[in-house]
Amino acid sequence: MLGKLIGGIAGLAAGGPLGAVVGAALGHVADSSGFTNAVAPGAKRAAAPAPGIDHPTLSHGDARLRQIRLLAMLGQQDKAFALGVTVLAARLAKIDGVVSRAEIAAFKAHFRIQPGQEQTVGKLFDAARDGREPYEPYARELGRLFADAPNTLEDVLAALFAVARADGPLTRSEHDFLVRVHAALGISHAAYDRAAGNAASSRDEADPYALLGQTRAASDEVLRQAWKRLVRENHPDSLMSRGVPADLVARASDRVARINAAWDRIKRERGLS
């Protein structure tokens, strides 16, 4: 049923903060790997073992998680990323008992799906939402894959907040889910606040120190190291080489420009070379 709903609201896929994260990557995973059949609700067989990995008989959840790991091992981080965020979004939508049309629309808006892939991704969403296995390992895998790109992980958490709020204020179960996912992603408390909408992004933009994650009391060397670290974490070439989707790379490029501008302001204020 959810697959049909996702297909029926294709026109709502306007492209949110994560753009085409799922898109062709996730459709390709489903079409080429047999994932949909392997984990469909009510299926009688486990997914076929992945080459080079010694499995016992896998549960559906184990098969999903192992497939994410295998895709990452094969250098297909974009597909691993797409699969991981879909599982998390589906589980979040079901966490309070009922998956609403508004939550599905939010999923589509923030994880845009290419035309023609709606039914395929809908089946994956259906399969993932009814999982009984812990969801934290999926967030942990994403956190491991993108440990040096925390802003990408922050974007994922922000999109999950949007899905949770699509049908009204956060419930206790949704709040607990998001807190646990945040911890598993391994990103900062400040990132959680920004994703939740509790931080004033306009204030951060106006304050170059806040954009670098520092205060005016920080030393010149601390600020310089913070600038270098943030540029390294968001460098487009590094993200592209690791399979980060193009829309996220574009966001990172814009972020690097703002980081460099903030550092230039600080250098002028402090007379640094």
Image (cartoon, rainbow, N blue to C red):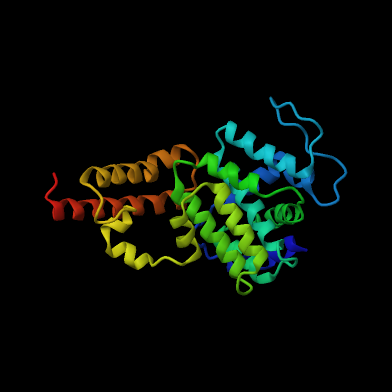
Q: How far from the left and from the top, in percent, is residue 261?
A: 24, 54
> Looking at the image, how many numbered discs can be counted on the residues?
0
Q: Quadrant of residue 200?
A: bottom left
- Report the side of 195 relative to 8 (left or right): left
Q: How far from the left and from the top, in percent, is residue 148?
A: 44, 41
Q: How far from the left and from the top, in percent, is residue 96?
A: 71, 66
Residue furthest to the left: 271
Q: How far from the left and from the top, in percent, is residue 89?
A: 64, 57
- Report the side of 85 relative to 187 (left or right): right
Q: Quadrant of residue 129?
A: bottom right
Q: Is residue 87 visible?
A: yes
Residue at the image position 56 percent from the left and 50 percent from the top: 183
Which quarter of the figure is the C terminus placed in? top left
Residue furthest to the bottom: 168
Residue furthest to the front: 217
Q: Report the front residue among 120 and 79.
A: 79
Which quarter of the figure is the N terminus placed in? bottom right
Q: Report the front residue among 225 and 130.
A: 225
Residue at the image position 45 percent from the left and 37 percent from the top: 241
Residue at the image position 74 percent from the left and 40 percent from the top: 62
Q: Is residue 17 visible?
A: no
Residue at the image position 54 percent from the left and 48 percent from the top: 185
| 148 vs 208: above or below | above
